[in-house]
Image (spheres, rainbow, N blue to C red):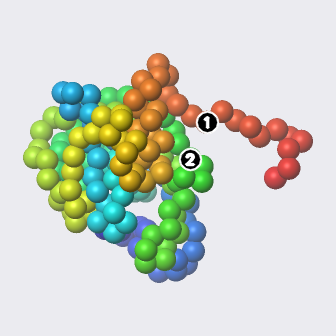
Amino acid sequence: MPMSTYLREIRSRIGHDLVVLTAAAIVVFDGQRRILLGKDVEQGFWSLPGGAIDPLEQPADAAARECFEETGLIVRPRRIIGVFGGPEFLIRYPHGDISYYTTIAFSGEIEGGSLRPRDGEMSELGYFNAPACESLTMSPSSRIIARQTFAALDSPYFEEARWRPDSPS
């Protein structure tokens, strides 16, 4: 999995310890309202195109860049699906790194490119409808975003706040 220069520098200082990052993901539909997923080379699960946002990068640009790097498609983000976090967004990579992502998920339109795995992160790509997604081995984070996408909510998703001043930390 390619790592940015920024994250490589952080990892050189802290090793495999937890890093908290902001990420962008993008949902791209085909003409049959199926979403594009890629099969992760390292872990074998299916996931949405996406990844960490580089320092000073706009989230929509990160979503478009990650999609191109992973799928070969040139996309334009059109709307925010939601902002996601929680235990499903903690990832323990096979090589030992631990990362937690707060993810901004977009939906987008294809503007060009050629569908093919590009950067070695995905072994295969495919479009899946909601029932097919439920039967796939998906990353927990992509499953949550896919479910919210297929729910087609009118406003961006976020988990309701449960914190209160008198609640235990």
**Location of residue 109 with respect to 134 vertically, above or below:** above
The kind of residue on which mark 2 rests is: Gly
Name the one closer to the observer, 94 or 54: 94
Query: Which picture quadrant has residue 166?
Result: top right
| Residue with the most extreme right position | 166
**Location of residue 155 with respect to 19 vertically, above or below:** above
Q: Quadrant of the N terminus?
A: bottom left
| Residue with the most extreme top position | 154
Q: Is residue 50 left or right of residue 112?
A: right
Check contact, mark 2 vs mark 1: CB within 8 A: yes
Q: Is residue 143 left or right of residue 163?
A: left
Q: Is residue 124 left or right of residue 9?
A: left
Query: Which picture quadrant has residue 36?
Result: top left
Name the one closer to the observer, 46 or 153: 46
Q: Which residue matches tag 1?
A: 159
* Mark 2, other Cα within 10 Å: few <14 / some 14–19 / many ≥20: some
Q: Residue at x 40, y 42 (%)?
A: 134
Residue 79: where, in percent of width, then height? 37, 28
Q: Is residue 61 visible?
A: no
The kind of residue on which mark 1 rests is: Glu
| First in sequence: mark 2 vs mark 1 | 2
Residue 61: where, in percent of width, then height? 32, 44
Q: Residue at x 60, y 53 (%)?
A: 87
Q: Is residue 82 visible?
A: yes
